[in-house]
Amino acid sequence: MAWWQRWVRQPQSVSFRRAVFQIHLWTGLLAGLYIVVLSLTGSVMVYRVELVRFFATPRPQFDASALRRSTDELRAAAQRMYPDYVITYISDAVTRRNPTIEIRLERRGETKERLFNPYTGEDLGDSTTAGESFLLWVASLHDELLLDRDGRFWNGAGSVLVTLLALTGSVIWWPGPGRWRRSLKPKWSTSWPRFSWDLHSALGFWCLGFVALWGVSGIYLGIPEPFTSANDYLFGPPPEFGETPGDVFLAWLARLHFGRWRNGPLQALWAVVGLVPAVLFATGSVMWWNRVVRRTLRKDA
């Protein structure tokens, strides 16, 4: 019997599959914490625009015909509210996107950055709220692993491991002709170890495309040079007014990675499925504990 026939009928007996399984297992364990962090923060970042709007200091309605307070009037208003501070900066641009005036005040090394209503002189609140600062921290953790620009490269390297997990998982998922149907959904009325196995298998099958997409797009966002070089080689320089097919593909690759759609249900789907890698790690860890660690402890006992 050829090896591929044995893989179809009795996949557990094929040595190649066993080797791929070991790669899948240890890659998942080594990259587990990274995967959980990226999974959780990525789901949050799907709603980054909405969350920034929610946490930001409320802005007044832009009114091009309204009379604005002068810079001196705003300075005097800020000085009355914060008499112990020295005003070091006052912005002067009021736009439709941000109809406020930012005033920076300092006192013995302490700095305040406040937003003022340009029409009434009212103190609106902090220029950057605590909620916005937290979102910036989450974004930095997801995009750069809190390592500034160097973190993008390591994020790309971590995405290589995610892609490897997707590829190896697609190889070892096949359980055989008599078992594949039960690997498509978990059985709820069963033991916890068996449920973890079923859930891991079912989520891995149905969400394989998403995990592979996030892996490949993560490599592109962290290490873009190979992708852009391949684009230039295949399609040459872009036309004067337009984009090459490679440019369109790479733009969609980044867009699909973040999933910030204007379609509410589609955006919610991206946020929910974004949690799947974390669940896969949790269920995979339970399987490893029950099948390897627990058996070893019992044997030693």
Image (cartoon, grey):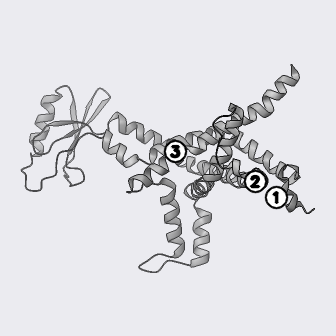
At x 7% / y 56%, what residue is drawn? Answer: 65
Query: Mark 2 and mark 3 in contact (Cβ < 8 Å)?
Result: no
At x 80% / y 33%, what residue is drawn? Answer: 292
Q: Nearer the viewer, mark 3 or mark 2?
A: 2
Location of residue 67 with respect to 240 vertically, above or below: above
Q: Which numbered disc, 3 or 2, marks the residue that appears first in the sequence?
A: 3
Residue bearing the label numbered 2? 174
Q: Residues within 10 Å of mark 2 (few under 14, many from 20)?
A: many
Closest to the observer, 31 or 278 = 278
Amino acid under disc 2: Trp
Q: Can residue 237 be spotted in the picture?
A: yes
Residue bearing the label numbered 3? 142
Cα separation between marks 3 and 2: 32 Å
Amino acid under disc 1: Val
Cα separation between marks 1 and 3: 39 Å
**Element marked by disc 1:** helix
Location of residue 61 with respect to 88 vertically, above or below: below
Query: Mark 1 and mark 2 in contact (Cβ < 8 Å)?
Result: yes
Closest to the observer, 230 or 27 = 27
Residue bearing the label numbered 1? 8
Q: Looking at the figure, which quarter contains the N terminus?
A: bottom right
Closest to the observer, 261 or 217 = 261
